[in-house]
Each structure stands twice: as C-alpha cells, then as structure tokens.
Image (tube, rainbow, N blue to C red):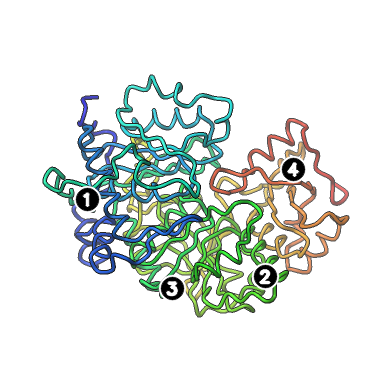
Amino acid sequence: MTKGKLEISTLLTTLSPERLARHYADRHWRDKTIYDHVCDYAEQTPDAPAIHDCFRTIDYSTLRKSADALALDLYRRGLRAGQRVAVWSPSRFETAATLLACSRNGYVCCSSLHRDHTVGDIVGLIDRMRATALVFEVGYGADAERIDFDAAIKSMGSLSCIYKLPPLSETTVLAPLFDGCFKDVDQAIQPNPVKTPDAPVYLAFTSGSSGEPKGVLHSNNTLLANSRSITVDWNMNAQSVIYSMSPLSHNLGFGAMINAFTVGGALVIHDLVKGNSLVDRLADTGTSFLFGVPTHAIDLLDELEARPEIKLDKLAGFRISGAAVPDHVCMKLTERAIMPQSGYGMTEACSHNYTMPDDNPQRIMTTSGCTCDSYEIQIFDRENQDEVLPAGEVGQIGGRGASLMLGYFNDQAATEDAFNTEGWFMTGDLGWVDEAGYIRITGRKKDVIIRGGHNIFPARVEGLAITHDRLKQVAAFPVADERLGERVCLAAVVIDSKPFDPSDLLFHLEKEGLSKYDMPEFFLKLEAMPLTASGKILKRKIVDWVVEGRVTPRPLRAN
C-alpha cells in the first residue's frame, strides 16, 4: 500500500446520499465531531474535569492540548486521513487522547484490543487492520511476561509510529508519555482539523462469541447520535460524573466515554487496585451514573450491605449490560434509589434500546427497553428475513437508524450479507415487541435448541434461572442426543460454597412459569464461566468442554 493512500475496498460503507440526507434532516447527524465537542468544553469550561483516574484528574483544557499534540506528532510522521491507529492498554487517559487525535485528523482509532488478548492475537489484529500507529502499555496482555511484544511487532511493515506507555502509577507524569509529543503545540505548523463527521473514526472488533471477530466501522456521527439520545433520556449533563466499570476497550466503556464528552461531564476510569473499595471511589468522585455488568452490580450491593453507613446519594442510574439483570439485584438497587437500566444493542448499532428512568421494576426486569429516537427496530420471520411479523410474534430482530455502523472493515461481502433487501440490519437475535414498544429478547437465531423438533430459546431459560437467589451466572446450551437431536443443559456459577441441590432448580423454574417442554435435562456446576474479552459468556467453549470430556453434566431427571 502506498504510504498515505488507503485502498478503496478497506472503507466501503453503507453510506448513501439518502441516508446522509435523512439523518442530517432529522438532526441526529450534525456537522460536528467528537473532537469538536471536547474543544467546545475546553473553551467554555477549561478547568472542568474530563477524566478521573486513581492518581489524577485531567481537565478539558489538558485533554484537548494532549489530543492536539498527538495529532500533530502523527501528522508529522506521515499519517493521513483514513489510516488506523491501534491502542492496546488498560483503561487510561491516553485512550481518550488517541481517539480525539483521530477524530481531529480523520484517522481511525481501534481501541478494542483487550487484556485477554495474547501477543499473537494482537499481531494478527494489527495486521488485519494494517495499523500505521500503535499506542501500547509495556507489559500488558495475557502473555506479556513470556512473549516479547517489541520483537513481535518489529517486522510489521505497516507500523511507522509506536508509542510505549509505562504502567500508570503515582509517579507517572503526562509530559513524557508519548515520547515528548505532549509538549506545547506550535499552532503555526498544526494542520487544521479534518472535518469528517461522516467518515470512519472508530474500528471495533466484535467479541467473536460466534466465530471470527468482525471489524465494525463507526463514524463520529453514528457514535454521537446514540450518545445524544441516551444522555437526553437519562438526564446526563455537564455536572454528570460517569463511571465505567467496563474497560474502554469494550464498547460499553467506550460508549460511557462518548457520553461524557457529548455533555461535557466527567468520566471516571475503573482502575482500582484489587482490594480497594469501589464504594469509597464512587463516593469520592460523586459518581452519578454507572456502566457495568450484572457481576459488578452484585459486588456493589454486597459492599453496600457490608457498609450501611455509606450513602451514595448522587448515584442515580446504573446501566447493566452483557446479561439479564437478576430480579433481586434490580429490586435491591431500586430500594437504594439507584435506577437500573436494562438495554439491548450490539457493536454494529450501539445501545439503541434501553429502559427509562421512570420505568417500573417489572419492566426493567422483563424487557430490554424501547428504542431511542435515533433508531428503529422491526421483527422479521426467522426463515424469510424480508417478511415482517405482526406485533407480539417472535422473530429475528432487524434495525436501522443513525447509530448503525458504516460497515465491516475490509469485508464488503459480510457488510452486504448483514442487511435484508429493504436495508434493515439483521442482528441474528430473536425477540418480540410488546404493546408498549419494549423489546423482549428470546435468544440468538443460531442458539435455538431443537429438541425433537421443538424450539427452545436459551434466553428464556436463562432469564428465569438467574432469578434463583443462589445462582450468579447461568448459560443454557445444547447437549447432543441420538434420539432427540439436542437436549438442554444449564451451566451455572453458584453464589456461595454451600451445597446446591440441582433438583431445586427445576422446582424454581416451574414456579417461575417455564414450560415442562423447555426444562433443562442436565445441570453443570462451574466455578467460573468462560468469557470473551468483553465479558460475554462463551457458550461454545462450554460445549467444547463437554465434548472433550473435561466437564460432565449431571442429569436432572430421568431421560
């Protein structure tokens, strides 16, 4: 590839004149980038906190200057619009600075490189995206203590800019982090910002829970459209303190960061040393909104119950993603005036469905919210993705709107295959919409368990099983059966070490309304679930363990 020139096939997108006109007309897209938002706040409230980590607070003025300095350094080293900048590090200030530098100069930031990735994984992803620049923390990753990352990337021809970050500590200062590029910027040689709110700015690899990760491309506008909706609906503003317990490499944490920059609020990075108090951190920072997964909510409630003297009066909301919110968790949060938010979304479309602050607990526990004003969903027949189903029927969820991706990176075939003939993005998820417009997720199209011709939806089984007060995580998956084809096995992580009688689970599921034809026939107790880097349960790994004989499910009833 010629330096500074991008192959057309890499960035083919779903953009069309019609889509541009529609989203600009409805004001969900605007002539403004994420960098522009931060510049506004750097001018209006330069001393306002933008990012808190365990050691320091970065204000909006410093954040902008750092982004400008990095943008200039990258430009001097030959990067031009459209080229990719990869970030492999824990959640830290430099991720935000890199994103903003990319937003300023028209580069594409890929920060979805996770702690669980190996050096081999990262080399493969850098090669796939043909990254020209890399920002990474020394010693980070699943096998960093064994594999020399410097040696692994030395021969990668695409990389022309490499920035090494020392591990963050009390003695780490900002100035030398990027080898001096955070010095005062000479505006005389600084190129003007590239005003490209519709061009790719963010490359996120999917979790790979169902196969090879895909590279999802988003623009400033697709990211900001979703953020504008959720910040308005949940009353976030410049006084908001948004704490993400999910890493910035994951879309949940990345979205929390975009929300903060949209309204000029503060982002709190979850970099607590193990054993330190989360409750104290929330109180000290004045956190008003949390982002996390059910395990985070359970741990928070456990600490609050152990320390009744602590009152988190400013904490008003908690977005819980990745799995169903257990009923008892939802009720305990609402009793403390912390409104849980359940929702639905994916890398390709952002968090377009969510419950509202005034929704009752029953709606939060049983649905995944309604669509925001910048998105719409429709239910289609499972076998014919062009046939719309009536309200209340289960089918494949399709979506379209301002927060929908531009396409899959360097994969035009996958991009085209993801849409039906009317331009609806087909999620592969199954669900139905109730009379109030709230969606109920029943599972993945590929995950349906077929027992003797009868369709069983794992999400339904899991949603009822997780309401058992002894279960922390659950996963329903198929086990092969010679006569029936498949049977249901429920894997579970039990909350404590007390004996657990699996037969009690069947009574619980029956009481909760699960049909006898959908009941699990096997139970598998696990110490921990296998997870993707973004925290989703890897069901296929559990299936592999069973097939390999590493774990053995226990029959729940006579077969």
Q: Callout 3, which amino acid? A: Trp
Residue behind mark 2: 304
- Which residue shows up at 32% across the image and 26% down it? 158
Crowdedness of circle 4 by 10 Å Cα count: few (<14), some, many (20+)? Answer: few
Q: Nearer the observer, disc 3 or disc 1?
A: 3
Q: Position of residue 267 (x, y in %)?
A: 43, 61
State whether residue 151 is above or below residue 351.
above
Which of the two discs, 4 and 1, labels the residue nearer the N terminus? 1
Crowdedness of circle 2 by 10 Å Cα count: few (<14), some, many (20+)? Answer: some
State whether residue 304 is above or below residue 257.
below
Specify the quadrant of the image occupied by residue 42: bottom left
Crowdedness of circle 1 by 10 Å Cα count: few (<14), some, many (20+)? Answer: few
From this viewpoint, which residue is outermost toward the top?
155
Residue behind mark 1: 16
Residue behind mark 4: 484
238 vs 522, nearest the viewer:
238
Q: Is residue 508 left or right of residue 11?
A: right
Q: Position of residue 182 (x, y in %)?
A: 29, 45
Q: Nearer the observer, disc 4 or disc 2?
A: 2
- Which residue shows up at 81% across the image and 60% down it? 506
Q: Callout 1, which amino acid? A: Ser
Secondary element under disc 3, as helix, strand or loop, is: loop
Q: Callout 2, which amino acid? A: Leu
- Which residue shows up at 40% across the image and 40% down it? 87
Q: Callout 4, which amino acid? A: Leu
Q: Is residue 238 left or right of residue 459?
A: left
Q: Nearer the observer, disc 4 or disc 1?
A: 1
Q: Position of residue 509 (x, y in %)?
A: 76, 63
